[in-house]
Image (cartoon, helix red, strand yellow):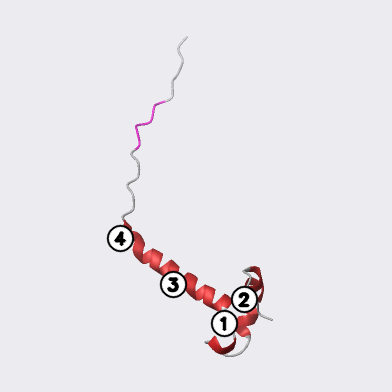
Amino acid sequence: MAYATAPVPEATHALSPVPIRALLPWAALVGVLTLVLLYFVGAEQGALSVLSGEAVHEWVHDGRHLLGFPCH
């Protein structure tokens, strides 16, 4: 009795690593966005506020408490 065998796939080549020069702009963008988000969550009120009013404070209020920033 003959048995059918599954075809053996060819060896796949490992993906080449991404060069650091290609990652640097993305890392810089993520870093800047993280700092802006941290500013708005942690410091956007009082004397350092960029935007007037309480709108930003109300939008990030729960996140501020979650991250340990006091606001009251």
Q: Position of residue 37 (x, y in %)?
A: 52, 73
Whether residues under marks 1 and 2 lie with C-beta atoms below 8 angstroms apart, the answer is yes
Q: Position of residue 69 (x, y in %)?
A: 62, 74
Q: CA distance from mark 4 to mark 2?
A: 35 Å
Badge 3: few (under 14), some or many (20 or more) residues near its Cα, within 10 Å?
few
Whether residue 10 is in magenta: the answer is yes
The amino acid on which the numbered mark 2 sits, given as a three-letter code, is: Val
- 19, above or below 65, in the image: above
Residue 54 vs residue 40: left or right?
A: right
Give the residue pinned by disc 2: 60
Give the residue pinned by disc 1: 44
Of 16 and 4, the residue lying toward us: 16
Give the residue pinned by disc 3: 32
Q: Which residues are magenta?
A: 7-12
Of 1 and 61, the residue lying toward us: 61
The amino acid on which the numbered mark 1 sits, given as a three-letter code, is: Glu
The amino acid on which the numbered mark 3 sits, given as a three-letter code, is: Val
Q: CA distance from mark 2 to mark 3?
A: 18 Å
Of 56 and 45, the residue lying toward us: 45
Residue 12 vs residue 40: left or right?
A: left
Q: CA distance from mark 1 to mark 2?
A: 9 Å
Q: CA distance from mark 3 to mark 1?
A: 16 Å
Q: Kindly identify which numbered label has been placed on residue 65.
A: none
Whether residue 17 is in magenta: the answer is no
